[in-house]
């Protein structure tokens, strides 16, 4: 059942951020460029190397998600109130990409290109509504603070994933996933939440190939 959901209520209850495809992320402050020096540069200045690009690591998230069965859109609920059904394995790969230095485009503008290595690695129970076999359309990767992702799944709907560090269990990553037609119209029968462990080293590198 697709229903209008009070965005602030569920975001508050699950500890989630506002979605980048609904409201653009805060603008990142960039250092001001120094005034141009009209004098001739010294030989050593001419040979300075270009600044190194900071890269995010390859991240393989191995998760267990349960379906929220008692979400009430009419009121705010504490996370402890939620009841879950099932324990679904789910794995997601985020490749090594440059650290973001600009804000993402608003949802009314074309999305940025998504690295094709970004993908759902495993969804044996099919809880992503077919997104596992399709490329992501929008990915806003502010790792480790948050990652927000959508995949078109047909009929004007998207599969939406939000990741952020777990406050309840430091060292793990909280994941929320649902089917949506916009930021406040979600499928109440497809609200999934759970935690992920971060695989690194050989496991992440192998999945990235």
Image (cartoon, rainbow, N blue to C red):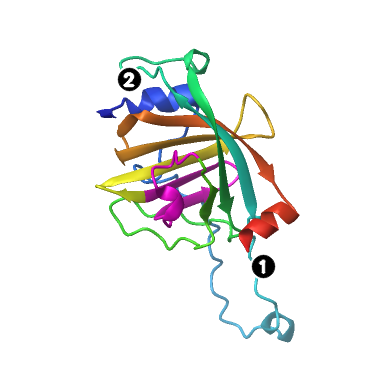
Q: Is residue 57 above or below residue 164?
A: below
Residue 73's tag is 2
205 displayed left or right of 149: right
User: In this orientation, which residue lies closer to the viewer: 154 or 177?
Assistant: 154
Q: Can residue 37 be spotted in the picture? A: yes
Say which element carries label 1.
loop
User: In this orientation, which residue lies closer to the viewer: 105 or 16?
Assistant: 16
Location of residue 4 in the rendering, given as x and y in whole percent from the top left corner: 26, 28
196 displayed left or right of 8: right
Q: Is residue 48 above or below residue 126?
A: below
Q: Is residue 150 magenta?
A: yes
Location of residue 118 in the rendering, given as x and y in whole percent from the top left corner: 52, 56
Residue 14's tag is none
Disc 2 packing (10 Å; few <14; some 14–19; many ≥20) = some
Residue at screen point 55% across, 58% down: 31
Query: Which quadrant of the figure contains the N terminus?
Result: top left
Residue at screen point 71% across, 52% down: 203
Location of residue 92 in the rendering, given as x and y in whole percent from the top left corner: 56, 48
- Dot 1 corresponds to which residue? 52
What is the spatial separation of the Cα atoms under label 1 and label 2, in whole angstroms? 47 Å
Label 1 or label 2, whichever comes before in sequence order: 1
Q: Is residue 205 above or below residue 186?
A: below
Location of residue 166 in the rendering, given as x and y in whole percent from the top left corner: 61, 31
User: In this orientation, which residue lies closer to the viewer: 119 or 37?
Assistant: 119
Residue at screen point 68% across, 54% down: 204
- Which region of the structure is painted magenta? 125-151
Say which element carries label 2.
loop
* Residue 160 location, quadrant: top left
Q: Is residue 116 above or below residue 141?
A: below
Q: Is residue 162 magenta?
A: no
């Amino acid at each position: 059942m697709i229903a209008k959901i009070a965005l602030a209520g569920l975001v508050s209850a699950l500890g989630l951020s506002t979605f980048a495809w609904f409201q653009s992320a805060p603008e990142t402050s960039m250092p001001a460029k120094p005034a141009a020096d009209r004098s001739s540069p010294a030989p050593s200045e001419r040979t300075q190397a270009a600044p190194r690009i900071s890269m995010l690591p390859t991240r393989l998230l191995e998760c267990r998600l349960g379906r929220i069965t008692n979400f009430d859109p009419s009121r705010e609920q504490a996370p402890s109130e939620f009841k879950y059904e099932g324990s679904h394995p789910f794995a997601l790969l985020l490749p090594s990409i440059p650290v973001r230095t600009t804000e993402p485009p608003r949802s009314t503008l074309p999305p940025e290109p998504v690295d094709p290595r970004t993908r759902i690695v495993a969804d044996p129970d099919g809880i992503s509504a077919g997104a596992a076999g399709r490329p992501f359309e929008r990915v806003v990767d502010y790792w480790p603070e948050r990652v927000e992702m959508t995949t078109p799944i047909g009929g004007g709907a998207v599969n939406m994933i939000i990741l952020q560090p777990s406050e309840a269990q430091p060292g793990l990553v909280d994941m929320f996933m649902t089917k949506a037609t916009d930021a406040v119209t979600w499928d109440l029968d497809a609200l999934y939440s759970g935690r992920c462990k971060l695989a690194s080293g050989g496991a992440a590198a192998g999945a990235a190939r």
